[in-house]
């Protein structure tokens, strides 16, 4: 075992003494050493219930003959960090989490690891860390929160009950009393926010990849099923250690293509482009944005979950969860290994599916993928759009640019009614390097929808979006403005055309004029010149490569 490096032989007497100080018995000194990486935090609603899950995992490990060690990693709640400078830290935290997992597990020579996760950047960070270590590993995502209920408002989510409600209040559609009532009831329990936002999308894709036990992604954070899954995951990781089953045995090229296919079919978060590319990079797999583009042209969506419909994760779970998706997509997915010991085909074969909610692929009424990659003079290296969040009548949109060099400036314009139907809001200098940190734009996109402009205005940015974003919203524009991308050259009054069926985005300005503007463009002045964000900005790659560092 790897842990023999710290516990076997006369020379390791001091090491064993320190381990005994930590509570390891002489008998358990011979057991596999299993880490439990936990991002428990009182600050993150998706993580506040993790103390119980830690203990369930620990019990499972000890029941199977392992020795468990819990250690902490950082966690950021994107919802709380949203709409201000704190969001700059969200995406960079993904790599910080991976570094922490790698550092602790490698320094202490752990034999295996259970990665307890939930929210947006934590799950991909855990997967990247697991792949770097390449020791037996299993992911336990802590699950979605319960749906909110308030007066005559049912199946509330964090988005409909809070972010979009702000726009409705400012538009005079609801009273302040109603807004405050929604504020209290939209997030009624521990867990990840209720829709197919980034946290739940990544949980589903982790299960598709084969790194979580069946139903882990959708089982509620407050359910007994989640506690049982945590316990069983603790037991199973010991089995993975015995069989020397590593993440590289699970996360193969076929598994990655399965994850991309499932993301397109579920209409998940646009952040999955960043995260899956980064995970593939950690696994040394040849997966590029071209794979997303290629598959999005032939894979169509099968189900729409909030924010693209009123269905929530509880509905998705009751309809069969990820195993049902495996069954629905069986002909589109390769048969790959999973940490539970069954293959994806075997899981699909035995899965329950409510076809009224999750129809079989061939019976789906949708014709487009849930996500798409657009190219054009405005995004020569690509950009992304959540097609599932766009009304079909808006698939082709042409409007007039209104430019803003920060999210705050765009929010000010929205709040003061300076945006009208037919406008294309351009938010730039918010990319991975320029932001720095590539902030999410849920605040402006939700305000846009809340004010009734979701179908008559578009928003484009070199920043990114929450999985909760809906509307004509194009993000990840590459090259970003800070790197001299064409988005830096857009001026108020320019016409911009978005063409989803043909996967195009164009700034309707001549090349001659663009070259003139480029000669007049001032060099980018970094917004942050010290600390973690400065180091991140100096090393981060562009969004089309997963914003890896």
Image: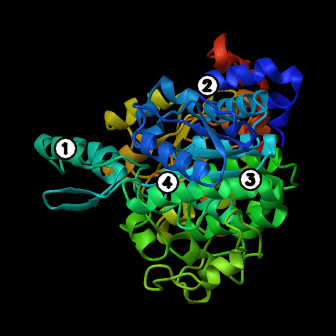
**Which label belongs to residue 22?**
2
Q: Quadrant of residue 232?
A: bottom right
Determine the residue located farthest toward the top in the rendered image: 530
* Residue 379 place in picture, x, y as percent: 72, 47
**325 to 363, vertically: above or below:** above
The answer to whether residue 329 is visible is no
Q: Are there few (<14), some (14-19), or many (20+) residues within 10 Å of tag 3? A: some
**Which label belongs to residue 197?**
4
Q: Secondary structure at mark 2?
A: loop
* Residue 101 place in picture, x, y as percent: 69, 34
Q: Nearer the viewer, residue 458 or 527?
A: 527
Q: Are there few (<14), some (14-19), or many (20+) residues within 10 Å of tag 4? A: many
Separation of disc 3 and disc 1 at Cα? 41 Å
The answer to whether residue 35 is visible is yes
Q: Nearer the viewer, residue 464 or 460?
A: 464
Separation of disc 2 and disc 4 at Cα? 39 Å
Q: Residue at x 55, y 39 (%)?
A: 426
Q: Earlier in the sequence, mark 3 or mark 2?
A: 2
Q: Earlier in the sequence, mark 2 or mark 4?
A: 2
Question: Label 1, on which residue?
Answer: 179
Q: Earlier in the sequence, mark 3 or mark 1?
A: 1
Please identify the quadrant where the C terminus is shown.
top right
Separation of disc 4 and disc 1 at Cα? 22 Å
* Residue 300 place in picture, x, y as percent: 63, 76
Q: Quadrant of residue 149?
A: bottom left
Please identify the quadrant where the N terminus is shown.
top right
Q: Earlier in the sequence, mark 4 or mark 3?
A: 4
């Amino acid at each position: 075992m790897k842990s023999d490096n710290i516990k076997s032989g006369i020379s390791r007497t001091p090491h064993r003494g320190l381990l005994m100080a930590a509570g390891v018995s002489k008998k358990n000194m011979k057991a596999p050493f299993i880490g439990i990486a936990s991002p428990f935090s009182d600050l993150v609603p998706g993580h506040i219930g993790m103390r119980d899950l830690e203990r369930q995992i620990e019990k499972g490990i000890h029941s199977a003959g392992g020795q468990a060690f819990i250690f902490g990693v950082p966690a950021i709640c994107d919802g709380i960090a949203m709409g201000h400078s704190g969001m700059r830290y969200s995406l960079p935290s993904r790599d910080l989490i991976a570094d922490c997992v790698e550092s602790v597990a490698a320094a202490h020579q752990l034999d295996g690891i259970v990665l307890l996760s939930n929210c947006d950047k934590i799950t991909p960070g855990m997967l990247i860390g697991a792949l770097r270590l390449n020791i037996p590993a299993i992911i336990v995502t802590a699950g979605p929160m319960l749906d909110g209920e308030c007066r005559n408002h049912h199946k509330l989510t964090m988005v409909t009950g809070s972010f979009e409600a702000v726009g409705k209040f400012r538009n005079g559609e609801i009273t302040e009393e109603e807004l405050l009532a929604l504020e209290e009831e939209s997030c009624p329990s521990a867990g990840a926010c209720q829709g197919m936002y980034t946290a739940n999308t990544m949980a589903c894709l982790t299960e598709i990849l084969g790194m979580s036990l069946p139903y882990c992604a959708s089982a509620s954070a407050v359910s007994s099923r989640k506690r049982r899954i945590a316990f069983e995951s603790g037991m199973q990781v010991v089995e993975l250690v015995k069989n020397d089953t590593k993440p590289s045995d699970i996360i193969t090229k076929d598994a990655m293509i399965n994850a991309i296919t499932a993301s397109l079919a579920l209409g998940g978060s646009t952040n999955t482009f960043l995260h899956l590319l980064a995970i593939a990079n950690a696994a040394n797999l040849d997966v590029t944005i071209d794979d997303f583009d290629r598959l999005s042209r032939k894979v169509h969506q099968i189900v729409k979950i909030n924010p693209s419909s009123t269905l929530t994760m509880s509905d998705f779970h009751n309809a069969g969860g990820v195993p049902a998706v495996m069954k629905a997509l069986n002909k589109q997915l390769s048969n790959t290994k999973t940490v539970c010991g069954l293959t994806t085909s075997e899981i699909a074969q035995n899965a329950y599916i409510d076809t009224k909610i999750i129809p079989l692929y061939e019976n789906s009424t949708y014709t487009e993928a849930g996500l798409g990659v657009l190219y054009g003079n405005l995004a020569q290296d690509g950009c992304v759009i959540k097609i599932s969040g766009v009304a079909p009548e808006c698939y082709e949109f042409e409007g007039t640019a209104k430019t803003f060099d920060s999210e705050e400036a765009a929010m000010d314009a929205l709040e003061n009614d300076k945006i009208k139907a037919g406008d294309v809001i351009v938010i730039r200098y918010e990319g991975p390097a320029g932001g720095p940190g590539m902030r999410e734009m849920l605040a402006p996109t939700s305000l846009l929808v809340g004010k009734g402009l979701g179908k008559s205005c578009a928003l484009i940015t070199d920043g990114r979006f929450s999985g909760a974003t809906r509307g004509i919203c194009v993000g990840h524009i590459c090259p970003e403005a800070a790197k001299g991308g064409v988005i830096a050259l857009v001026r108020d009054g320019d016409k911009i055309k978005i063409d989803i069926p043909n996967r195009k985005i164009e700034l309707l300005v001549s090349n001659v004029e663009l070259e003139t503007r480029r000669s007049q463009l001032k060099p980018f002045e970094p917004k942050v010149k010290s600390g973690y964000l400065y180091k991140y900005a100096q090393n981060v790659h562009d969004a089309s490569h997963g914003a890896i560092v």
